[in-house]
Structure formats: structure tokens, C-alpha cells
Amino acid sequence: TNEYKHESKNEDFSEELIKLTQQNQFLQQQLKKLENNHYQTNQQQHEISNQEYYELENQLSEYQSLIEYSRDNTNYLSLEINTYQCLLINLVSSTQQKTNLLSSKIPGFNIYFDHGTMWVRI
């Protein structure tokens, strides 16, 4: 009977060892799946982040181009306005009568004199 108990304990121990080994294998497989899922999720997030970064970088470049174009256009228009102001000043004589006549013919322009200098305000 003593021998039977010893064999029974060995058998129980063997069964327990088999169960624990199987559980260990199962847990290792689950861990590997989780690690793979985690890696894939990180990889996808990284790709999405890179894609968003490049899209934003392209948008920024487009906005910078638009800003530069607007600045150039503003400078050009400012030069054009200055040119037309100079042309108007050269066309108009210094008499107040002709100034009033010209002001009424050109809407949006105010022409006035200050200390002998004619000013054109747009």
C-alpha cells in the first residue's frame, strides 16, 4: 500500500506537471500573439503618423507658397499704386479748381494740397 501511495503521488505529480506544461505552452502562445498584435498596432500607428506628418508638411509648404505669393502680390500692388499716384500728381496742375474737377472724375481718390504739395489718397 505504501508503494501504491507513492506511485499515486508520482502519477498525480506527473499529471500536474503535464497540465502545467500545457498551460505554460498555451500562455507562451498567447504572449506571442499579444506581442505580435502589439507590434502590428504600433507599426500601423507609426505608418499613419508618418503619413499625417508628410501630409501636414505638404500643406505647410503650400501655405508658405501662398503667403509668399501674397506678399509678392502685395508689394507689386503697392508699387502700382505708388506709380499711379505719381502719374496723377504729374497730370494735375497745382490749381484747386483743376484738383476739384479731377477728384470728381476719379472715384475713390482724394486729392488735396498741403503746404504747396499735392497729396493723393486712395
Image (tube, rainbow, N blue to C red):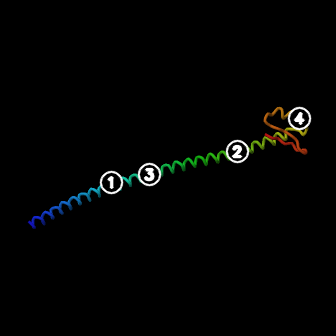
Question: Element at badge 2?
Answer: helix
Q: Is residue 103 left or right of residue 16?
A: right
Within 10 angstroms of label 3, few (less than 14), some, or many (20 or more) residues?
few
Tell me the amino acid under the disc marked 1: Lys
Q: Earlier in the sequence, mark 3 or mark 1?
A: 1
Is residue 109 shown above or below 49?
Answer: above
Residue for point 13% across, 63% down: 8
| C-alpha separation, residue under disc 4 versus residue under disc 2 | 32 Å
Tell me the amino acid under the disc marked 4: Lys
Q: Earlier in the sequence, mark 3 or mark 4?
A: 3
Q: Which residue lies under the disc numbered 3?
A: 45
Q: Nearer the viewer, mark 3 or mark 1?
A: 1
| C-alpha separation, residue under disc 2 versus residue under disc 3 | 42 Å
Q: Is residue 113 left or right of residue 15?
A: right
Within 10 angstroms of label 2, few (less than 14), some, or many (20 or more) residues?
few
Q: Which residue lies under the disc numbered 1?
A: 33
Q: Nearer the viewer, mark 2 or mark 1?
A: 1
Q: Nearer the viewer, mark 2 or mark 3?
A: 3
Mark identifier at residue 98 = 4
Residue 98 place in picture, x, y as percent: 88, 35
Q: Earlier in the sequence, mark 4 or mark 2?
A: 2
Front-most of 122 and 4? 4
Residues tagged 3 and 1 counted as in contact (Cβ below 8 A): no
Q: Earlier in the sequence, mark 2 or mark 1?
A: 1
Residue for point 27% across, 56% down: 26
| C-alpha separation, residue under disc 3 versus residue under disc 1 | 18 Å
